Amino acid sequence: MSSTRESLAAHQPRLRPEVLVSDALLHGPRTVHLVKDTATGQSFEVGPRERFLMVRMDGSRTVAELGGEYAAAFGKRLGDAHWSRLFQLLGGRGLLDGAPRPERQDEPAPEKANGPLAGSVRLVADAHATAGRLHRATGFLLGRVWGTLLLTALGAMLLVLALHPGELVDGAAAVFTEPVLLMAVATALWLSTAVHELAHGVAARHYGGRVGEIGLRWRLPVVIMYCTVDDYMYLAGRRARIVVAGAGAVANLLFLLPFWCWWLLAPDGSTREGLAGLLFLGVLQAAAMLVPLPPLDGYTIAGQLLRGLRLAESSRTYLSLALRRSPDAAAYPRRARAVYAGYAAGTVLTVAALAAVLVLLVRAVVLAA
C-alpha cells in the first residue's frame, strides 16, 4: 500500500496540449469552467477546484506538489481516493498524456436542406486561410496606434451625428419614400454586414483563434454573410474575446466613415439627404448588433463583461425564482444575483431605447409620406 501511495505521489500528470480550459464563468448559482478536447470534440464543465489542478498538470509537478499547492489555496489536502477519482475522470476522457483517447464523437452535422427560401452555402474552402490573408492586409488596424486613431475618428463621427438628429431622421424618412435611393442604401448596408462578418474573422486570427467557416445564409427575403470562430470561449484573455465579438459593430461604423466625410462636405440637397439617411440607418444597424440578446454580438460581449454563461437563460431562471420568492433564489451567491438582475435591467433599457428610435423613424416616414 505504501509503495502504491509513493508511486502516486511521485506521478507527474500532464494534460494533452489539445485540451482547452476556459476562464471562470457564472452558470446559474455555480461558477464553472468549460473544458474541451479539440482532438475529439468532447466538452464538459468542471468546478474551480478541478480547474485549479488541471491547469497545473503540465508534467513538471508531481502529485505531491500539486497536492501542496491545492492545500495552500483551499485549506484542505486531497486524499488518495480523490486523486484516483480525478485521474479516472480525466484518463477516461482521454485528456491525460498516455491515456487511451476515445474516438471522436462529434454530433452528426444536420443536413443542410438548401432551397429557394432558406439555406446556406460556404463561400471559401479554407475560411481560416482566407481570414489569414485578410489579417495580413488589415490586421495593423487592430494595433494600439491605428486602433486608437480609428476609435477617435469614430467617436468624432458619432458626436457630430448626435448633434444633427433631426436631419438624420429626415434623411432616413426620405430613403423609405424613394425606391431608387432605398435600393442604393440597402445595398450599402448589405455590404456593411459582409464587412461586419469578415471583421470577426480578422480579429479572431489576430488573437490566435481559428476561423471555421465563411459563407452565405439566406432566409428569404434576408440574405447575409456569416463567419464562425471555433473555440471562441477559449481565446486567451477576456479582452481578446470582447474585441473579437465587438469587431463587427466597429467595422459597421468604419464602413460609414467615408460617407460621413462626404456628408460633411455635401451641400444641401438630395445627395446630402440620402447620405444622412444612410448614416442614420448605418449607426442604427451597428447599435442593433450590440443589443445584449442572443444571438447578437452584444449578448456575447455582455457574457464576457459579466463573466456569465448563457446569461439570458440563467437570468430568466433566477428572476423567476426571485419573483416567486422561492428559497432556491437564496442559494445564488451575491455576485450571481447582481449579475442576473443587472443583465435583465440593462437589456430592458437597451431594447426600450432602440424601440424609441424606431418609433421616431416610423413617425418621420409617415409624416414624409
Image (cartoon, rainbow, N blue to C red):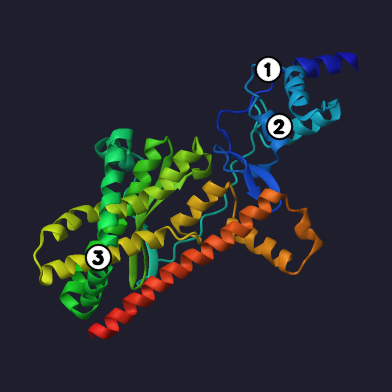
CA–CA distance in space, label 2 to label 3: 63 Å
Categorize mark 1 by other alpha carbons within 10 Å: few (<14), some (14-19), many (20+).
Answer: some
Q: Please tell me whether residue 81 is drawn above or below residue 162 in the rendered image.
A: above
Quadrant where the C terminus lies? Answer: bottom left
Disc 1 target residue:
61
CA–CA distance in space, label 2 to label 1: 17 Å
**Amino acid marked by disc 1:** Arg
Find residue 336 and report its horizontal and vertical position in percent. Answer: 67, 51
First reached walking from the N terminus: tag 3 or tag 1: 1
Categorize mark 2 by other alpha carbons within 10 Å: few (<14), some (14-19), many (20+).
Answer: some
For residue 323, side relative to residue 113 (left or right): right
Q: Which quadrant of the figure has residue 363?
A: bottom left
**Amino acid marked by disc 3:** His
Q: Viewer-proximal residue, 353 or 206?
A: 353
Categorize mark 3 by other alpha carbons within 10 Å: few (<14), some (14-19), many (20+).
Answer: few
**Amino acid marked by disc 2:** Gly
Residue at point 66%, 28% (across, down):
96
Disc 2 target residue:
91
Mark 3 or 1: the one toward you: 3
Of the numbered discs in the image, which one, if any, rests on residue 164? 3
Find residue 95 and report its horizontal and vertical position in percent. Answer: 64, 32
Of the numbered discs in the image, which one, if any, rests on residue 159? none
Q: Viewer-proximal residue, 200 or 58?
A: 200
Find residue 304 and report its horizontal and vertical position in percent. Answer: 53, 47
Find residue 249 and report its horizontal and vertical position in percent. Answer: 36, 54
Q: Which quadrant of the figure has residue 287?
A: bottom left
